[in-house]
Image: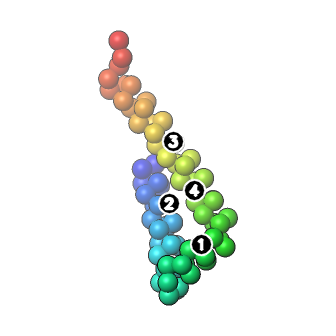
Amino acid sequence: TTHSFTQLLHKFLSHVHQLLKEKKTWDQAVKELQKKKNIFRIYKSKLQKTWHTLAAQKQVALKNSFPLP
């Protein structure tokens, strides 16, 4: 799951990077990003889900490693 989170993040960042390469200025890129809000909403929810899954797994692992009295 760490891998899938990293992959998603990489995909998202390369998307942003591509937009920055296409646009001449940061402002133009930001405007373009705002037009594509849905894409980023999807990324955001996917990243959050993956992150929460990861966090839950880590919690379980920690509890198993260090059982609380």
Q: Amino acid at mark 4?
A: Lys
Is 28 drawn above or below residue 7 in the view shown? below
Q: Residue furthest front?
A: 27
Residue sitting at 38 percent across and 32 percent down? 61
Question: Is residue 12 visible to the viewer in this orientation of the structure?
Answer: yes
Q: In the image, what residue type sits under mark 1? A: Leu
Compute the Cα span from label 2 to label 4.
10 Å
**Pointer 1 residue:** 33
State the residue in front, 3 or 38: 38
50 is higher (above) or lower (below) than 6: above
Residue 28, horizontal then vertical, whole percent = 56, 81
Q: Position of residue 63 (x, y in %)?
A: 39, 25
Separation of residues labelled 1 and 2 (CA atoms) = 17 Å
- Which disc number belongs to residue 44? 4
- Looking at this view, name the residue that lies furthest to the top: 69
Q: Are marks 2 and 4 in contact (CB under 8 Å)?
A: no
Q: CA distance from mark 3 to mark 4?
A: 14 Å
Residue displayed at 56% across by 74% down: 30
- Badge 2 crowding class, 10 Å Cα cut-off, few under 14, some 14 to 19, many 20 or more, is some
Residue 53 bears which disc, if any?
Answer: 3
Q: CA distance from mark 1 to mark 4?
A: 13 Å
Picture residue at 56% right of the left edge, 47% below the top: 49
Residue type, mark 3 in image: Thr
Please report whichever mark, 1 or 4, sits nearer to the chain's N-terminal start.
1
Identify which amino acid the numbered label 2 is placed on: Leu
Q: Nearer the viewer, mark 3 or mark 4?
A: 4
Quickly name the residue at label 2: 8
Callout 2 secondary element: helix
| Mark 1 vs mark 3: in front | 1
Question: Dots 3 and 4: beta carbons under 8 Å?
Answer: no
> Where does residue 29 sit, x and y in percent of width and height?
54, 78
Identify the residue at image location x=35%, y=19%: 67
